[in-house]
Amino acid sequence: MRSLFPVGLAVLIAGCASFGVGPGGATRAAQSDSARATFTTTTFDTTWYISNRRREAGELSRNPTDSLEYGLIVTRYRERSGPGSDGRIAEDSDSEPIDSARLSRSDFVTRLRMRLADSPDPRSGAIVYVHGYGVSFGLGITQGSDIGHRISHTGAMVAFAWPAHASVVAWPSAAAVVSRAYRDDSATAAASHDAFLSAVSTVREAAGTQSTTVIGHSLGGQLVTEALTRPGARRDTLVKQPLTALVLFAADVNLARLRDSLASTLAAVASRRIVYASDDDLMMDMSRFINKSERAGEATPSLQLTARGFEVVDVTRGRRVNGALRKIFEPGHGMRFAATALFDFAAVVRGIPARCRVALGLSTQMDDGSWRLLNGPIPRNPPRLEPGEC
């Protein structure tokens, strides 16, 4: 185990400072004019959002509210490659939110239903992305949007934006620079369970019989797993019509609790449970330091989850999105930058079963039943597998 808490903190703060905040709070990687000039393709993606952040003075604050806000944000992407290409998943791009709209719940459901009906791939369905700690509203939208964009998702990408800190740091004292913000966000995540379940219910209403996949990233994984295992009418509904998949990426979840207390309950509400984990994630190192416990997002410890019905995918060796500054500062934590993992995730969304992973060409199955992603080129034309094949 590396002693990386002080080093990781310094790298993380430096990294956050090096990736500027653009219009609407969305992040944009620092790039030169000459780099931007090489972008030849422009596309526009819509990300839907549901938030329990209280709106104050026209802005969504860090204070929670019992009433949910619904809306959408349109993002413009400039890139070198088009939809479905290896470049879209693995190469850097330039993005900027250009339009937004607040919606009533009924209008949200109607528009989301229309978007899903218009999708050229009925298997795509809806994805609900739940961000982690220290993430502003704008950054949470950007993370979800980037994931949907990189996998060329033609269904609906919905971000559940809970009221986390806008930064990974709070400043009560030098010794508690990270742990204060982290513990604040942990408490807020726990208080957002009902709001998240309401958001999922709204998306399921729009999706109907189409698939619904939930992603819990980092501390969002803790929010999602605890909420989905709470007794109540919403959980009973999910038992009758389970989620297509529950995806935990770099999950900041107590491993022992997930293994011993939550796993069997989650099996009843999600047909597939996938854990993407890494042994080279600085944020997992810091969380383990703070919590004094193994985290589900650590690849080696997470192997224990295979016996509990989880598909455990080790992303440590997988390819990450290119970019000079990102190679220096990115702590190996963000799902939107995990190119090979996104390639694998796209197959999950399309309903390709776990047994097909090796046939896709970027993973190998281990003797313990887990999968290990490989650091090879992303196929430009991946095998056209159907769920019944392999």
Image (cartoon, helix red, strand yellow):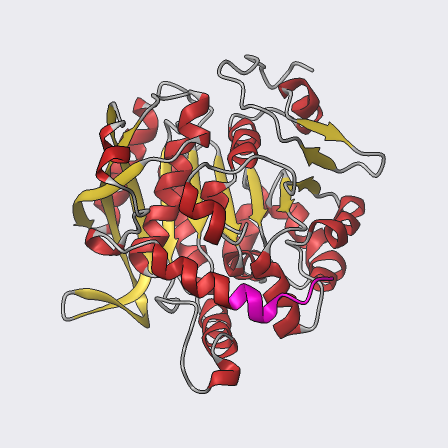
Q: Tell whether position 2 is magenta.
A: yes
Name the quadrant containing residue 370: top right
Residue located farthest toward the bottom when viewing the structure as drawn: 173
Q: Tell whether position 335 is magenta.
A: no
Q: Nearer the viewer, residue 313 or 230?
A: 313
Q: Nearer the viewer, residue 240 or 1?
A: 1
Q: Quadrant of the N terminus?
A: bottom right
Query: Residue 292 at what x, y percent from top left?
Result: 69, 73
Q: Is residue 53 above or below residue 326?
A: below
Residue located farthest toward the right when viewing the structure as drawn: 367
The residue drawn where x is 70% and y is 53% is 263
Q: On the rendered structure, is 34 left or right of 381?
A: left
Q: Nearer the viewer, residue 14 or 225?
A: 14
The reply to whether residue 242 is in sight is no
Q: Which residues are magenta?
A: 1-9
Q: On the rendered structure, is 172 left or right of 105?
A: right
The reply to whether residue 335 is in sight is yes
**Number of marks:** 0
Query: Residue 55 at what x, y percent from top left?
Result: 21, 67
The residue drawn where x is 36% and y is 18% is 120
Q: Nearer the viewer, residue 60 or 337?
A: 337
Q: Is residue 91 above or below residue 84?
A: below
Query: Residue 306 at what x, y percent from top left?
Result: 77, 44
Q: Is residue 248 above or below residue 53?
A: above
Query: Residue 27 at what x, y percent from top left?
Result: 31, 51
The residue drawn where x is 43% and y is 57% is 196
The residue drawn where x is 62% and y is 38% is 271
Q: Quadrant of the C terminus?
A: top right
Q: Is residue 224 above or below residue 13?
A: above
Q: On the rendered structure, is 341 left or right of 324?
A: right
Name the quadrant containing residue 57: bottom left
